[in-house]
Image (cartoon, rainbow, N blue to C red):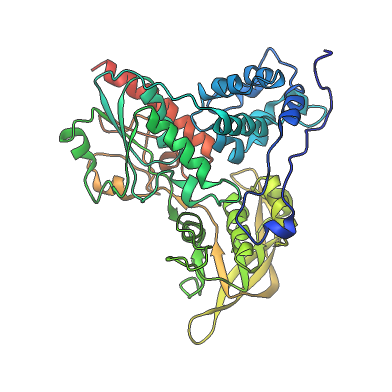
Amino acid sequence: MANFNMSNFKHTMPARDPSKRCSDFMETTLGYDENAAMEEARRCIRCKARPCTEGCPVKVRIPEFLALVSEGKFEEAYQVVLQTNCLPAVCGRVCPQETQCEGRCTRGVKGEPVAIGRLERFVADFHLAHSVKEAVRPAFNGHRVAVVGSGPAGLACAGDLAKMGYGVTIFEALHTAGGVLVYGIPEFRLPKSIVRSEVEALRALGVEIVVDAVVGKSFTLSSLLNEWGYEAVFLGTGAGLPRFMGIAGENAKGVFSANEYLTRVNLMRAYEENAETPVYRARHAIVVGGGNVAMDAARCARRLGAEVTVVYRRSREELPARREEVEHAEEEGISFRFLSNPTEILTDGQRNVVGVLCTEMELGEADASGRRAPVEKKGSLFRLDADCVIMALGTSPNPLIPRTTEGLSSGRRGEILADEGGRTSLKGVFAGGDAVTGSATVILAMGAGKRAARSIDEYIRNQ
C-alpha cells in the first residue's frame, strides 16, 4: 500500500475568484496540474469489484486509467478512457459523477471518493494540449447510417458506428453541432472550444455533419431510408420543448423558458457586446426551479448584471442540482428562496414583468419520486420584485419527428417509444437519449447512443 495515497479527502479543484468570474463567461474551474492529478489518482486502491466502472453509464475502465495517471502516463490514460467514451473532456466537466462512478467508489465509504471526473477532465485536456497524432480512420464497411441530432446521444452513437467502419452522417437542425452541449450548458461550465474539439475528433473518424437540416420539415425520416441510401437511422433529437407552470402572467414581456434564455446566451453569444441576437439584461431576475438548468440560467443572468433569486418549492436538501453548482452560484452572489412557489407573475400596463407573487410551501408526504411533496401554506403570499422571470421546470422531448412519421410510436409527452437497445416500432429506426427518456444527463444519453450503435450493427449485419 506504500504507493497509495490514503488521504480521505480529494485534492481541491482550483477555481477562479467569484468576485471576478461572476462578470465574465470564462471557465469557473481551472483543473488539476500534473502533480495534483498523479496524487489524486493514487487514492484509487484498485478494487477488484470495480464498483466505479459499474456506476458509469458508458463503462469507462476507471481503475486502469487512474493507474496510468498515477504513473504520469497521461496520454495512455486518455486512450483507455476514449475506448468507451468519445467525449471525455465534456463528461469530465458536466457529468454528475457524485451519483454515478464516484457514488460507488469504495474510498467514499469512510471519506471522499476519488475525484474520477476531475481526472477524466485532466487526461482529456492533456491530450488536447499535447497530442499531434492524427486519428486513424477505420476502413469503410460499405454500409451507411443516418444520425438525427448532434447532442450527446447522437455523437456517441455516431462515434461508435464510425469506429466499426460505418459511413455515418449526422443531421443537425441548428447551425452548430453539439446539441445541448452548445445551446444549453454555459461557456463558464463547458467552453465551446472543448465541444468543437470533441466534434472534430469524430469528423476525423469520417463522420459527416450536416447542419441546418430539420428532419420532419426539411426532409422526412422515410426519405433517409428509402431515397438517400441509409440502411438505418438513429434518432437523438433530445428534449427541447420547455414546460411552464400555467399561471397568470407567463405570457408577459420578460418571461423566458430556460431553453430560450440559455440558447440565446450560449449558442448565439448574447452576452457579447453588440451581439446580433441580444437577450434582455435584467436588473432583478427570478429563476424558478432547482436543477442544473436553473443554476445555469441563474449564473448566466448574474453575469449579465442581474441580482438573481432562485425560487424552489422544496427545501435545500431536495435540490436536484449538483452540489458544486449550487456552491458556485452562492459564491457568485445568487440568493435562494426555498419552500416557495410562484402563483402569479405581476405586470404593469405594458405587460412588462414587475414582480412575482409567491406562496410559502411545506413538505408533506413522499410522492411518486420518493421526495416529500410540497404543500401550500394558506395565507402565506408574498411578493418578490423582478423584471425578468426564467422558468427552469424541465423539458419534454421534441415531438416533431413522431408527428411527421407514420408508424413511429410515441408516448403522451411526445417521447419516442424504444426498447433498451433503442429499437423503435419502425424497421431500421432506432432512438435514444432525451428523445426517449425525457430530460436526463449527458452521460445517460451517451450510454443510450452507444447501446443503439450496437443494435444498429447487429441489425445491419443480420439483413
The spot of residue 370 in percent (x, y) is 64, 43
| Residue 419 visible to an observer of this rendering | no
Residue 120 sits above or below residue 44 on the image: below
Q: Is residue 79 left or right of residue 51?
A: left
Which residue is at a point 28% across and 18% down the rendered structure image?
141
Query: Which part of the image, by quadrant, shows the N terminus?
Result: top right
Q: Residue at x 34, y 31 (%)?
A: 207
Instruction: Compare residues 41 and 227 and report the one nearer the observer.
Output: 41
Q: Is residue 267 something that shows in the picture? A: yes
The answer to which quarter of the image holds residue 46 is top right
Where residue 32 sits in the image (x, y, percent)? Answer: 71, 35
The image quadrant where one finds the C terminus is top left
**Residue ranking furthest to the bottom:** 349
Image point (46%, 72%), residue name: 251
Measured as percent of width and height from the top left, residue 415 is found at 39, 44
Taking the view exactly as shown, the residue that stands out farthest to the left is: 227
Could you tell whether 258 is left or right of 376 in the image? Answer: left
* Left or right for 385, reference 45: left
Q: Is residue 313 above or below residue 132?
A: below
> Could you tell me how many numbered marks the image carries?
0
Instruction: State which quadrant residue 427 falls in.
Output: top left
In this rendering, position of residue 178 left or right of residue 194: left
Q: Using the image, determine if residue 311 lies above or below residue 74.
A: below
Q: Position of residue 149 (x, y in %)?
A: 37, 42
